[in-house]
Image (cartoon, grey):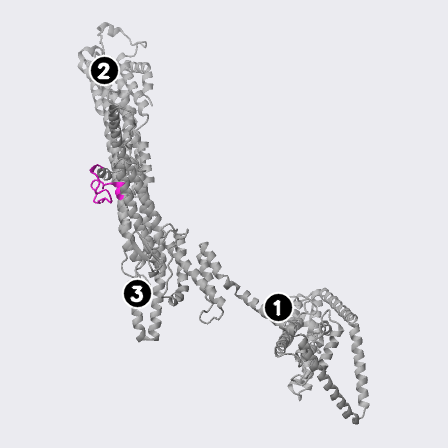
């Protein structure tokens, strides 16, 4: 210890305040008096010598100390030396860091190191000279007053550096004969070095520092120096008494040394003998003191030993307290169904080696933890066998049971002869363990499964698939029982529907029984149909609930199987490399074991697929009853084969529209669930020996179920289409026959509703096309019935409805159907248009015939008067002559026809692009002109005296109705006019009549003036 202190004093020789500021390790602690020091000095004097020959300085070095105390003292001294060494290294490191800092405090960067600059000062001097020369060249190029000052400042720095370099070169020449280690070097820039050069320090370190920064750093240095002086003064004040004692001790030592030097050497032998005698007495006193101390403090030492033992035991118990609490914690976690924590707690106990542990308490803890682990295993097996457990809880139980089995594997090998069997179920699970000797055996619907014969994931898959198969059988049996009970007249609560009241006469009873029998005969059929719908819904819910659950377990089984086969393959390789001959048999046995064990794919193929197929057939039978007409698919009966004929007929009959719609939605959900499951089955396939999937063509076990479900969905959605269009056609027929309305919006709504309900619309394209055609045909038949015994206005209304349907409604329906069937109904528009166009054409043709009849009745010349030749020659056309009556009647007929068509059809056009109004006006105009011309030809002899007048009338008709007249009628009118002109009196011999002269023009203008009202009515 003294040597260590001396070393520390040497290290801190440069820093006086640092040396005096440290606390001495040998100084007394606070609270100790000087008497303690005196007792220590006395013990040093009376104790024996140590192994090194020095006097003992501690109790542990004396004769009275025991061996354990000496060993503990040696350990304590070693620890103290290690602490002192660490503190010294830390102080050295801090000192080196202090040497590397900038004493002026200008450079505060962490990457600044003054020692590094000092070690490489040759390089930095040369670099600084180059920088100064470059700066001088730059400033000389500026050539101004400030530049000259800067150049002078830089030149001064350069000269200072050159002076230092020259001094080094000169000293090197003077010392050429000296050794290399004695040759002088450049001055140092470290302030603690004897060769410190302040000019070199400022030039290399603070060449770019400003005057203000240097002034501030000088002030800081002054304050630091003053602070050190003040600290030195405070140190002297605080330890003044110590300084005085040291001074007095030095004086006493000097006096004794002087007095001994003056004694003669003859006295040395006598003094030595006295000292030996005195040391002997002191040794005897020390031995007696030691013996007396041992006798006096023996009870205290014994109690101290006991206390130490108890403390040691408590410390051991504190260290193993987590292990001691493991059994109770495991029980608590088992009660809370937190089996992952059970596994973690049990893993802690396995650190206890029961074969080499001599502590009975730890052996007991491990045994109790093993019992708790067995209980947890049984609870986990019950959860795996519980049909009400959720998918996530099953996956957690598989994981926890697998980890627990890995931990129990060694325990099971040691206890292979004994097995614990508990048949007690917990509230967490409702699985039923069979009452057999082997634990982990469960009976589910006459199927016995031992969980411990398979890995946890595979055993869970066996149990849950067996539950699924049992539930499918129960669902089919329940549906059959319900239908039989309804047919027998029993309610769902096993009560009979036959009831009678006492106190009534026999006639009343018989009549009431007959009416109740009739109502029951109708009611049981409806109830059976409803029972079929309920059975479909419950079966679909069963499939939707169990398929994702089984797939989750199947995926976990597949992953566990991959890991097991990979471990087995790796173990075979290792055994083959280590011992080829001995490992062949074990490898074959392992491979056979792996091959004999069923995989997840095999379980789905052998158990899930048949059960699911049967469930899908049951759903198809309940929802469909029988196949559609012309379908190649057969619907097999899953129940009711031995029932009565009437019940069997109801079971095999199609459901009504309402029940069919409900079942269709359930079947669509089932198809979606099975399709998702079938896609997920792509990851569950047979594995090869190396744990990878086989490369052969893969067929999913659920593929046949998916196909059967799709066929059932297509069949029931075809029925939905048929029922929907049938209901729509009835409504449209009633609306057409009663109100004369072609309700195309109802048909469009029906198609839109089907687009929301159908999931296989492309396969139902034929039914959709036939349904739209049927609705249109029923509407046309209803409109045809509407116009019977009605006027032309009803026919025009039917024509308007058909035209509106062709132009708007049918286009929307065709577009919606095209979206629904993905463009597969290409002939729908032509079929619908042909049906509606036929009705529209027939109704409008009938109306046009009626127009012709009305026109022929109105366009008649009436009574023709023949004036005398003298009156005809003397008479001059008068402007007051009225408009001809037959022309007025004809124009009124045409105007009436136009008004009727315009009110009913507005500006609608036919498919050819011609408006209905134009066709009606053309028919009326042709009828008027044709009638007048034929009548003029037939009465030519009577109209000959007034041929000029009738030719003018005919000319007026032609000019007014020219755009509505056909080419044949125009030709007939022209021939008739020429005939009238040739028959007129004015045309004999000369060919000039009144119609071709000024008088004829005047007459035409007069007609136009009189008939301008009719002309305006026929205008645009």
Front one among 500 and 546: 500
Residue 496, can we see it? Answer: yes
Q: Which residue is mark 2?
A: 857
Q: Secondary structure at mark 1?
A: loop
Which is nearer the N-term, disc 2 or disc 1?
1
Front one among 651 and 645: 645
Q: Secondary structure at mark 2?
A: helix
Residue 914 drawn at (x, y percent):
28, 29
Q: Does 637 appear in magenta?
A: yes
Residue 925 drawn at (x, y percent):
26, 21
Q: Which residue is mark 1?
A: 111
Q: Secondary structure at mark 3?
A: helix
Mark 1 and mark 3 in contact (Cβ < 8 Å)?
no
Of badges 2 and 1, the one in the foreground is 1
Which is nearer the N-term, disc 3 or disc 2?
3
Of badges 3 and 1, the one in the foreground is 3
Q: Is residue 509 left or right of residue 218?
A: left
Q: Of the numbered discs in the image, which one, if any, rests on residue 593?
A: 3
Front one among 785 and 417: 417
Of badges 3 and 2, the one in the foreground is 3
Q: Does 530 appear in magenta?
A: no
Badge 2: few (under 14), some or many (20 or more) residues near its Cα, within 10 Å?
A: some
Residue 278 drawn at (x, y percent):
75, 86
User: Which span of residues is magenta-colored?
Assistant: 620-646
Q: Is residue 553 left or right of residue 226?
A: left
Residue 129, can we see it? Answer: no
- Which residue occupies 34% across, 72% down? 575
Judge whether 634 appears above or below 504 on screen.
Answer: below
């Amino acid at each position: 210890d003294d040597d260590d202190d001396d070393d520390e004093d040497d290290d801190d020789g440069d820093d006086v305040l640092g040396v005096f500021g440290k606390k001495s390790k040998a100084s007394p602690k606070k609270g100790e008096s000087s008497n303690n020091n005196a007792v220590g000095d006395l013990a040093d004097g009376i104790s024996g010598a140590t192994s090194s020959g020095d006097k003992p300085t501690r109790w542990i070095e004396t004769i009275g100390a025991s061996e354990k105390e000496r060993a503990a003292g040696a350990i304590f001294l070693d620890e103290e030396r290690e602490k002192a060494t660490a503190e010294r290294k830390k102080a050295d490191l801090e000192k080196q860091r202090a040497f590397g800092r900038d004493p002026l405090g200008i450079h505060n960067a962490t990457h600044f190191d003054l020692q590094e600059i000092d070690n490489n000062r040759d390089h930095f001097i040369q670099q600084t000279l180059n920088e100064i020369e470059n700066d001088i060249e730059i400033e000389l190029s500026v050539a101004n007053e400030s530049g000259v000052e800067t150049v002078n400042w830089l030149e001064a720095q350069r000269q200072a550096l050159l002076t230092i370099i020259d001094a080094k070169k000169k000293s090197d020449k003077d010392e050429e004969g000296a050794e290399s280690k004695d040759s002088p070097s450049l001055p140092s820039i470290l302030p603690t070095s004897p060769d410190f050069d302040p000019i070199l320090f400022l030039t290399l370190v603070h060449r770019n520092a400003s005057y203000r920064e240097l002034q501030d750093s000088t002030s800081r240095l002054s304050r630091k120096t003053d602070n050190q002086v003040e600290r030195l003064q405070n140190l002297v004040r605080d330890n003044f008494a110590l300084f005085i004692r040291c001074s007095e001790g030095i004086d006493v030592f000097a006096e004794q040394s002087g007095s001994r030097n003056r004694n003669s050497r003859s006295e040395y032998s006598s003094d030595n003998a006295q000292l030996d005698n005195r040391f002997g007495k002191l040794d005897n006193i020390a031995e007696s003191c030691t013996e007396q101390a041992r006798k006096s403090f023996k009870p205290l030492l014994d109690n101290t030993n006991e206390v130490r033992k108890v403390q040691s035991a408590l410390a051991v118990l504190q260290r193993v307290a987590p292990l001691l609490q493991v059994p109770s914690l495991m029980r608590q976690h088992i009660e809370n169904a937190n089996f992952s924590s059970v596994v973690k707690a049990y893993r802690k106990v396995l650190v206890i080696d029961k074969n080499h542990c001599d502590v009975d308490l730890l052996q007991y803890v491990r045994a109790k933890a093993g019992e708790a682990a067995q209980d947890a295993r049984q609870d986990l097996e019950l959860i795996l066998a519980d049909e009400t457990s959720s998918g996530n809880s099953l996956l957690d139980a598989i994981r926890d049971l697998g980890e627990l089995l890995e931990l129990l594997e060694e325990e099971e090998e040691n206890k292979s002869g004994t097995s614990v069997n508990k048949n007690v179920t917990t509230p967490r699970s409702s699985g039923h363990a069979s009452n057999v000797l082997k634990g982990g055996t469960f009976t589910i619907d006459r199927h016995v499964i031992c969980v411990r014969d398979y890995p946890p994931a595979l055993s869970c898959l066996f149990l849950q698939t067996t539950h699924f198969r049992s539930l499918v059988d129960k669902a089919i049996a329940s549906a059959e029982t319900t239908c039989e009970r309804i047919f027998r007249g029993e309610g769902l609560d096993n009560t009979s529907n036959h009831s009678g009241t006492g106190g009534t006469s026999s006639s009343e009873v018989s009549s009431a029984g007959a009416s109740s029998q009739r109502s029951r005969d109708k009611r049981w059929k409806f109830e059976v149909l409803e029972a079929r719908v309920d059975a479909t819904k419950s079966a679909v819910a069963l499939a939707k609930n169990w398929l994702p659950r089984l797939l989750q377990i199947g995926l976990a089984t597949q992953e566990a199987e991959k890991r097991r086969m990979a471990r087995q393959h790796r173990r075979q390789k290792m055994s083959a490399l280590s011992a080829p001959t001995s490992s062949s048999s074990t490898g074959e046995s392992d491979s056979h074991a792996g091959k004999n064990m069923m995989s997840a794919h095999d379980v789905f193929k052998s158990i899930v697929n048949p059960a699911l197929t049967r469930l899908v057939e049951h759903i198809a039978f309940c929802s469909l009853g029988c196949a559609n007409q012309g379908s190649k698919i057969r619907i097999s009966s899953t129940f009711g084969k031995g029932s009565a004929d009437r019940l069997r007929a109801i079971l095999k009959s199609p459901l009504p529209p309402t029940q069919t719609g409900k079942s269709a939605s359930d079947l669509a959900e089932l198809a979606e669930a099975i399709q998702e499951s079938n896609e997920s089955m792509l990851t569950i396939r047979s594995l090869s020996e190396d744990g990878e999937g086989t490369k052969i063509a893969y067929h999913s076990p659920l593929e046949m179920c998916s196909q059967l479900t799709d066929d059932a969905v297509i069949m029931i959605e075809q029925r939905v289409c048929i029922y929907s269009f049938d209901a729509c056609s009835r409504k449209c027929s009633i609306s057409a026959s009663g109100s004369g309305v072609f309700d195309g919006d109802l048909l469009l709504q029906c198609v839109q509703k089907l687009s929301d309900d159908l999931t296989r619309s492309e396969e139902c394209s034929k039914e959709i096309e036939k349904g739209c055609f049927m609705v249109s045909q029923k509407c046309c038949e209803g409109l045809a019935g509407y116009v019977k015994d009605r006027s032309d206005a009803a026919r025009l209304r039917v024509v308007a409805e058909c035209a509106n349907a062709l132009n708007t409604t049918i286009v929307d329906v065709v577009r919606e159907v095209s979206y629904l069937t993905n463009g597969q109904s290409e002939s729908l528009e032509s079929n619908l248009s042909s049906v509606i166009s036929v009705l529209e054409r027939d109704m409008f043709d009938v109306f046009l015939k009626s127009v012709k009849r009305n026109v022929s009745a109105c366009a008649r010349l009436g009574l023709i008067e023949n004036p005398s030749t003298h009156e005809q020659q003397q008479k001059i056309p008068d402007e007051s002559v009225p408009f001809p009556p037959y022309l007025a009647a004809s124009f009124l007929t045409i105007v009436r026809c136009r008004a009727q068509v315009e009110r009913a059809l507005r500006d609608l056009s036919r498919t050819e692009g011609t408006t209905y109004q134009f066709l009606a006006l053309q028919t009326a105009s042709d009828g008027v002109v044709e009638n007048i011309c034929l009548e003029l030809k037939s009465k030519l002899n009577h109209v000959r005296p007034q041929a000029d007048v009738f030719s003018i009338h005919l000319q007026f008709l032609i000019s007014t109705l020219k755009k509505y007249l056909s080419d044949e009628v125009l030709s007939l009118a022209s021939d008739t006019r020429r005939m009238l002109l040739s028959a007129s009196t004015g045309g004999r011999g000369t060919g000039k009549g009144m119609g071709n002269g000024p008088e004829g023009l005047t007459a035409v203008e007069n007609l136009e003036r009189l008939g301008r009202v009719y002309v305006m009515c026929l205008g645009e």
